[in-house]
Image (cartoon, rainbow, N blue to C red):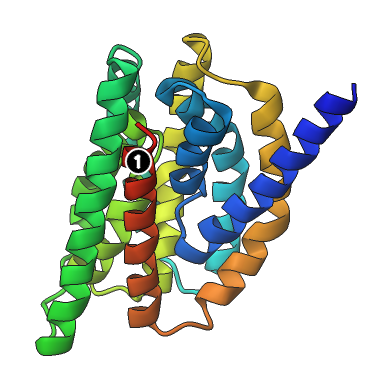
Amino acid sequence: MLANLQLDLAMLCLGAVFGGFGGLFGVGGGIIAIPILVLLFHMTQQLAQGTSLVMILPSVLLGFWKYRQRNSIDVRMAALLGGSAVLATYVAARLANAITTNTLRIAFATFLAMMSAYLAWKVIRSIANNRPRKALSWVYSWVVGVIGGLLSGLFGVGGATIAPPALTGFFGLSQTAAQGLALAMIAPGTVVALLVYGNAGAVNWGMGAAMAIGSLIAVPLGVAAAHRLPDRTLKLLFCGFLMINAIGIIVGQ
């Protein structure tokens, strides 16, 4: 009984940490939750991804609401991003449960490292070249939704990491508005992915629920912090955040 209570409290505190980072970077918190669940609780990659989705879903909804309160978010773009991500998420989530755990972990770490390097390059390039790029119409945002959905279904996270650089770089949005839209994009796909992982038995519902409660407490604090930071600072922090997670996964192999 005492051991169960201690575990619940630990997951509640971890959920608060995940939610704080998720609110700060607009990623739902799974990108840090998954490596920790694998390394500290010795979960398989699939179980860690499925369990984190229980926390991610309410965190994403709350995070989007908080970002929308502070930014002018195009509802049409949010709907298009979310809708186009759903089918891609389902297909990729089915594939993720058919891949060996070791292969999935290596692929996940590689994805994080590549994304970190890409975002850092984008920030450095923007400093050297301040010429504005012609913004694309919102109707092309479905491409971002499909790519984001594939990443979310395959890795349990990922859609919210690819969306902000794509939306700021090609659609001319601010970093915080892009992070808010990223959360809108992954919300419906998260529901689909959670159903697939749950059906495959790859979810620890108790641990996920405890993390969700802690996350909901901290998400608003992370969102508020994001709006106090300059765009470049926020982007560079996110790059370091991704790289640390990638290294952690590789070291833990």
Reading the image, the residue beneath label 1 is 251
Residue 194 sits above or below residue 158 on the image: above
Residue 39, image x, y percentages: 49, 34
Q: What residue is shown at x 42% (from left), y 43% (from top)?
A: 186
Q: Which residue is outermost to the right?
A: 1
| Any part of residue 91 in sight | no
User: In the image, 172: left or right of 226?
Assistant: left
Which of 222 and 62 lies nearest the eye of the viewer? 222
Q: Is residue 197 above or below residue 219?
A: above
- The structure residue drawn at horizontal position 56% and vertical position 20%, both measured from the top left corner, is 203
Query: Tag 1: Cα neighbours inside 10 Å, few (<14), some, or many (≥20)?
Result: few
Residue at point 25% right, 23% down? 103
Quadrant of res 100: top left
**Among the 4 quarters of the image, the one containing residue 76:** bottom left
Image coordinates for residue 50, horizontal then vertical, percent? 50, 26
Residue 120 location, x and y as percent?
22, 69
- SS under mark 1: helix
Three-letter code for the amino acid on which mark 1 is drawn: Val
Relative vertical location of residue 118 with respect to residue 111 in this rendering, above or below:
below
For the N terminus, the quadrant is top right
Could you say where residue 251 lies in the image, as x and y percent from the top left? 35, 41
Locate the C terminus and report the quarter of the image it occupies: top left
Q: Position of 133 compared to 12: left or right?
A: left
